Amino acid sequence: MDIPSLFNVKDKVVLVTGGAKGLGLMISTAFVANGARVYISSRDNAACTATATSLTAVGPGTAIALPADLSSASECARLASELSSREKGLHILVNNSGANWGESYDSFPDSAWTKLLTLNLQRVFTLTQALTPLLEAAAQASKEGDIVTDPGRVIHIGSIDGIRVPTLSTFAYSASKAGLHHLSRHLAVELGPRGITSNTLACGPFPSKMMAATLQNFGEEIKGANPLGRIGMPQDAAGACLFLASKASAFVNGATLTLDGGVSLMSKI
């Protein structure tokens, strides 16, 4: 099959949580640039609206703001209901919204665990569960109708800190991302028979608000420690997501793709 067909996402319906800033913005931009209709959701209404407007102006796809507080179960349900009222199907769900918390072991608060495990892990399940009927509806079967050739896609934005032990004191974040990676595998088994794949991008350092302070203080050291000598760029996130969202990855299910230039392979001994 030709490359344009394999990687085509034109006219597909996409929801990117946390899609107005940072890594989520890189992902939203990639889908709009390739002709998709992208819903951008986060609790920041103004950011969602501004991003949707700017991306639509560039096109050729479109972006629509659909704000929601994704840490809330009722807000996840409302988001799913509103999307269902607008679309007959959802081809791609990108679970990107997340939070981090860094603090020393001795003072690390219990509230941080509640916040991060809820947003980074529990609500990923909540939202995916609520949107499963739309994802099922978007799955495309073969001409004979006996197999799904273009599944609905769930792409989880994980972290290399869920694979290795990070140097920073981000206990709840790394645990939540490790949990997310395994949840993705569990969903792959559950949703595969329903025509939906579930895969994870375990991301290394990318320029984002979450990483801003770390990159400001340790940017050169982080780049120097990477086998490729740099941090992630927008096209790196774009390429990986477009692959997992397109026919090129129709048989990829339950995978964790490490997107870090190889830094997680480096020994600290």
Image (cartoon, rainbow, N blue to C red):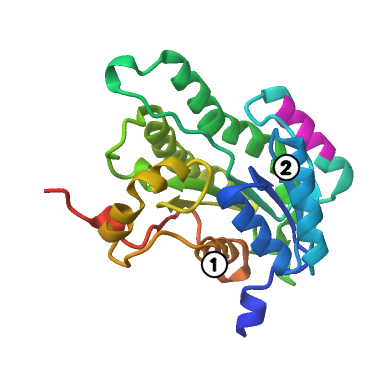
CA separation in Å, label 2 and label 1: 22 Å
Lateral position of residue 94 relative to residue 213, left or right: right
Instruction: Give the label, 2 or 1, closer to the camera.
Output: 2
Q: Look at 71% across and 56% down and name the residue there.
A: 91
Question: Mark 2 is on which residue type?
Answer: Ala
Circle 1 SS class? helix
Percent of width and height locating residue 52: 78, 52
The residue closer to the viewer here, 108 or 255, is 108
Crowd around label 2: few <14 · some 14–19 · many ≥20 (10 Å): some
Q: In which quarter of the image is the N terminus?
A: bottom right
Percent of width and height locating residue 145: 73, 65
Q: Can residue 192 be seen in this view?
A: no
Question: Residue 47 bears which disc, if any?
Answer: 2
Residue closest to the far bottom: 2
Q: Residue 83: which quarter of the image? A: top right
Q: Mark 1 points at which residue?
A: 235
What is the magenta segment's predominant secondary structure?
A: helix
| Residue 81 is covered by the magenta coloring | yes
Specify start and end residues of the magenta stretch as a single range: 75-82
Percent of width and height locating residue 123: 59, 30
Residue closest to the far left: 269
> Which is more N-terminal, label 1 or label 2?
2
